Structure formats: C-alpha cells, structure tokens
Image (cartoon, rainbow, N blue to C red):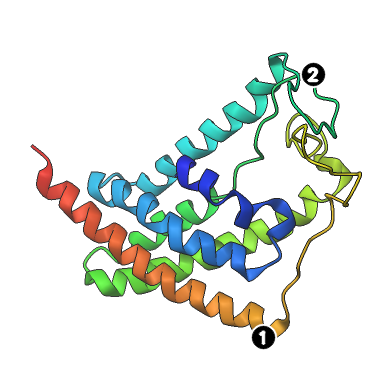
Amino acid sequence: MAQLGTILTASTWPTEMHNAACYLAVAIAIPAVLIAPAWGSQWRWGCTTVAGIYTAILLAFEWILPLFPAEPKLGPVYQHITHLVPLRFPLLLIVPAIVVDLVWRRTGQWGRWKIAAVTGPAFVLSFLAVQWPFANFLMSPGSRNRVFGMAYFAYFDPANFLYDPYQFRGVETRGRFWALMMLALVFSVITARLGLAWGDWMRRMRR
C-alpha cells in the first residue's frame, strides 16, 4: 500500500483531492492490496491492521526525515531547503479499512462477488467522506506545520513563486465528476473481488 500510494502521488496530491480522478485512482490500486492480506489472515481487524501499518510507515517518513540536514546540489532551486523533505501526509485509508472490517462481520457467509459488491463501494464512499473534508483542512493554514507537513516543498518546486500550492487544481465538470465516481465504484468491486481471490489463495497456502 505504501508503494502504491507513492505511485499514485500525482493523482492523490492534496490539490487533486476534490477531483473524482483521485478516488478512481485509489479504487483501482488500493482495495486488492488492502483486502488480500486481511482476508487471507482471517484476523478480526485485518484491514484496519494493514491500513494502520501503511499509516505508520508514512507518518514515520513525515516526521523523521525533516530531522536530517540536507541541501540541494543542483538547480533550479526555488525553495531554501536545509533538511530532507518528506512526501506528504498519508491518505486516510484507515477509515475505510475500519468500515470494511465492520461490513465483513455481516457478510461472512455471502458469496465472494456479493461480498465484493458491498465491500468496494463501502471502501470508496467512506474514503470520499473523510478525505474530501480533510483536503479542505490540508489547504488551510492549520496544516502548515511539522505534524501535517503542508509547508514542505521540494527544492525544485516553484510553489508560492509560479503557482499557489493551496488551491485545488483542475476541478472537474459535474458530468465528468459523476462519471468518474461511477467508474470508481465499478472498479472498486472488481479490485475488491481480486483481493478476496488473492486472500483465498493465501488461505490455501497456509501450512
């Protein structure tokens, strides 16, 4: 999840979090790797555990890297950097992970596709419900500190010089937004089903 989150950086950057494309990217990439180890392990809070580990890894980068001194060695240099710069605050995947764990308590005997049909949309909609308003906070002055890291910029980033880094960019039309959200729901079912199949394989491989 941490690796895929890095791959999805461009689509899930805070300035993109009011676009459906952000949630479509997450729906395509995340459910399978979240669900597979949780379903395979059969832990009661499996998804929550996986998402908690992801969150801990990214928070460690967020809070530890700036403690080490560093400076740019090539140009162009737009930001005065004196320390290592972390990537960004983790996505709030812990919330949809908790929701999925709770959903599974009521779907234990269902068929796999039926479970996926509930799990995928539950993941996407709960993620949308928490990440959308959190994005508003990330754009606000309250997030520009060491905890949330929204004041960090790479040395080559012309933020505050050539563009405003605290404005949502490329906001979609209403039609495109809803079309992409519908795609996100569809893909979430497919990737949730892949995660369940992967988890079933893990169960069969247990010794």
Q: Amino acid at mark 1?
A: Gly
Considering every residue shown, the one lying at the far bottom of the view is 175
Earlier-in-chain disc, 2 versus 1: 2
Q: Which mark is residue 74?
A: none
* Residue behind mark 1: 175
In the foreground, 163 or 112: 163
Q: Quadrant of the N terminus?
A: top left
* Residue type of the residue flagged with mark 2: Thr
Q: Residue furthest left?
A: 207
Q: Residue drawn at (87%, 52%), measured in percent from left and top?
A: 163
**Quadrant in which the C terminus appears:** top left
Q: Give the Cα separation between the discs numbered 2 and 1.
A: 44 Å
26 left or right, relative to 46:
right
In this view, the residue in front, 71 or 67, is 71
User: Residue extending furthest top?
Assistant: 69
Q: Nearer the viewer, mark 2 or mark 1?
A: 2
Residue under label 2, please give it. Answer: 82
Please provide percent x and percent y for residue 11. 61, 57
Q: Position of residue 159 (x, y in %)?
A: 84, 44
Residue 179 coordinates in the image, percent (x, y): 58, 82
Which element is circle 2 on? loop
Q: Name the residue: 24% across, 52% down.
A: 199
For residue 180, what is the image quadrant? Answer: bottom right
10 Å crowding of disc 1: few (<14), some (14-19), many (20+): few
Q: Nearer the viewer, residue 59 or 9?
A: 9
Q: Position of residue 142 (x, y in %)?
A: 85, 42
